[in-house]
């Protein structure tokens, strides 16, 4: 009986020493903290818990060197980007230098063509003569429409009313006008007349750029068909009209 108790006491003592190992200062008569769980239960419980999920940046930065996405641009990369940007800028500026004068010429030519189309249409609708007057000396133009008929004694007098003059701008000049098969006029007032049926003579209007005389825009007017075509030239060519014969129809 005593032997069994002695063995039991030894086993109890071993268990107590195992429990108190690394558990800090002893508390209580047997070196255990009150209500403390055995050490092996603590280990099992801790091992069953999942590991905390640290952020990616924290795990990547633990003992690791700098990554590529964390660093800035190198000097070589900056120089390459600046060189490409300078090349693109030169190409854009060079093209714009040629486009801006052409746009000014297209704008004036478009205004004249639109005005002539309107005058031709009004001449047909009203059954009267309308005309576009080009001042080759003063570098301006205007349209002239017939005023309302009024009685003077026993005759009907038809007057022509001229609108205000329109400027061509500072970059575009009237270089002259020419009738098909005739000479080119370079000064004075040149009228483009549309009769009561909307017909006019085959003629051409020449525009040049003030800073570049090689840029010549030719507005060709076909009197019978009523079509207007703008021909662009960058070598100073004036596209005159040839006289149309009956065989051309």
Image (cartoon, rainbow, N blue to C red):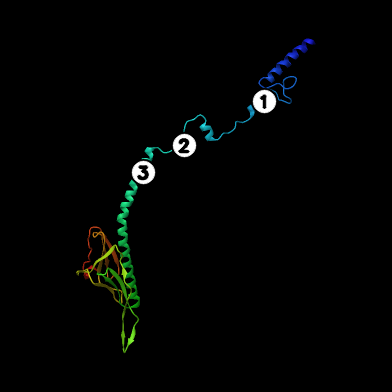
Question: Disc 1 to disc 2, how far (Cα)?
Answer: 42 Å
Residue under circle 2? 70
* Disc on the earlier residue, 1 or 2: 1
Q: Nearer the viewer, mark 3 or mark 1?
A: 3
Mark 1 burial class by Cα count in 10 Å: few <14, some 14-19, many 20+: few
Residue under circle 3? 82
- Seen in the picture, residue 7 relative to 55 is either above or below; the reply is above
Residue under circle 1? 42
In this view, the residue in front, 57 or 43, is 57
Quarter of the image that includes the N terminus: top right
Quarter of the image that includes the C terminus: bottom left
Mark 2 burial class by Cα count in 10 Å: few <14, some 14-19, many 20+: few
- Quarter of the figure with residue 241: bottom left
Mark 3 burial class by Cα count in 10 Å: few <14, some 14-19, many 20+: few
Per the image, label 2 sits on a secondary structure element best described as helix
* Disc on the earlier residue, 3 or 1: 1
- Quarter of the figure with residue 156: bottom left
Per the image, label 1 sits on a secondary structure element best described as helix
Image coordinates for residue 132, horizontal then vertical, percent: 29, 72
In this view, the residue in front, 7 or 162, is 162
* Disc on the earlier residue, 2 or 3: 2
Q: How many marks?
A: 3
């Amino acid at each position: 009986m005593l032997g069994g108790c002695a063995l039991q006491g030894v086993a109890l003592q071993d268990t107590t020493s195992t429990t108190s190992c690394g558990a800090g200062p002893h508390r209580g008569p047997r070196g255990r903290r009150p209500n403390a769980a055995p050490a092996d239960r603590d280990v099992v419980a801790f091992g069953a818990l999942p590991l905390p999920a640290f952020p990616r940046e924290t795990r990547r930065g633990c003992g690791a060197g700098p990554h590529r996405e964390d660093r800035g641009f190198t000097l070589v990369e900056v120089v390459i980007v600046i060189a490409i940007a300078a090349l693109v800028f030169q190409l854009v500026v060079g093209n714009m230098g040629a486009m801006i004068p052409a746009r000014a010429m297209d704008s004036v030519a478009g205004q004249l063509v639109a005005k002539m189309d309107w005058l031709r249409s009004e001449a047909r609708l009203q059954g009267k003569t309308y005309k576009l007057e080009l001042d080759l000396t003063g570098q301006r133009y205007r349209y002239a429409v017939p005023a309302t008929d009024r009685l003077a004694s026993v005759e009907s007098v038809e007057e022509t009313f001229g609108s205000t003059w329109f400027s061509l701008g500072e970059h575009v000049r009237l270089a002259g006008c020419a009738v098909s098969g005739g000479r080119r006029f370079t000064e004075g007032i040149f009228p483009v007349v549309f009769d009561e049926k909307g017909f006019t003579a085959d003629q051409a209007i020449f525009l040049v750029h003030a800073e570049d005389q090689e840029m010549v825009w030719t507005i060709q007017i076909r009197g019978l068909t009523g079509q207007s075509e703008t021909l662009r030239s960058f070598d100073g060519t004036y596209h005159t009209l040839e006289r149309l014969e009956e065989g051309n129809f």
